[in-house]
Image: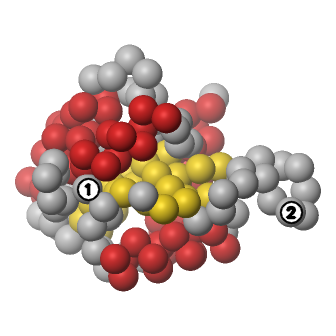
Amino acid sequence: MNQQNSSSFTTESSIPRLKILLVEDNEMNRDMLSRRLYKSGYDTITANNGNEALVILKDCRPDLILMDLSLPEMDGWELTRKIKSSKNLKNIPVIVLTAHALDADRKSAYAAGCDDFDVKPINFDRLLKKIELNIFEKEK
């Protein structure tokens, strides 16, 4: 478990930074995405697997979850089902990030309850648009 910025406020202003839980077992992907998200104005908390993500979610309520599907211990499909079946967590948007790019993979991710889907390798500009759409559309 790692948090990119221990404070949820920027040093430049008192505007709170939105928080994203990044569930990714690949260290390079996790580090790259965390850095890019931080530079784009988001704080990140990272989990290496589904079980670790559930522990984090007991104490923290992120604004959005970015989730790999192929995770050790508990895969992203199972974790998404658990999140979406929880009264306290079900409204947190989940965007799946995966190399599973087949239409059947997309359908199974949506069936598990994810709110959006994106394929690896990550197109960061496209991902940012999806993040903003999912966070700000949920606030309306």
Q: Is residue 103 left or right of residue 36?
A: left
**Which is more toward the observer, 40 or 43?**
43
Q: Is residue 84 left or right of residue 137?
A: left
Q: Can residue 106 be seen in this view?
A: no
Residue sitting farthest toward the left = 104
The residue wearing badge 1 is 49
The percent coordinates of residue 82 (x first, y second) are 24, 31
Indicate which disc residue 11 carries: 2
Q: Determine the residue positioned at 34% across, 77% down.
A: 27
> Are the residues tagged 2 and 1 within 8 Å (C-beta)?
no
Of marks 2 and 1, which one's residue comes earlier in the chain? Answer: 2
Residue sitting farthest toward the top = 87
The answer to which quarter of the image holds residue 98 is: bottom left
Q: Determine the residue positioned at 27% across, 23% down.
A: 85
Residue sitting farthest toward the right = 13
Q: How many marks?
A: 2
Q: Is residue 33 above or below residue 84?
A: below
Q: Within 10 angstroms of label 2, few (less than 14), some, or many (20 or more) residues?
A: few
The percent coordinates of residue 102 (x first, y second) are 12, 64
Q: In this view, does 113 lie to the left or right of 4?
A: left
The percent coordinates of residue 1 (x first, y second) are 42, 58
- Callout 2: SS: loop
Kind of residue indicated by mark 1: Asn
Kind of residue indicated by mark 2: Thr
Q: How far apart are labels 2 and 1 at the CA level?
A: 31 Å
Q: Determine the residue positioned at 37% across, 57% down.
A: 47
Q: Determine the residue positioned at 42% across, 38% down.
A: 57
The answer to which quarter of the image holds residue 96 is: bottom left
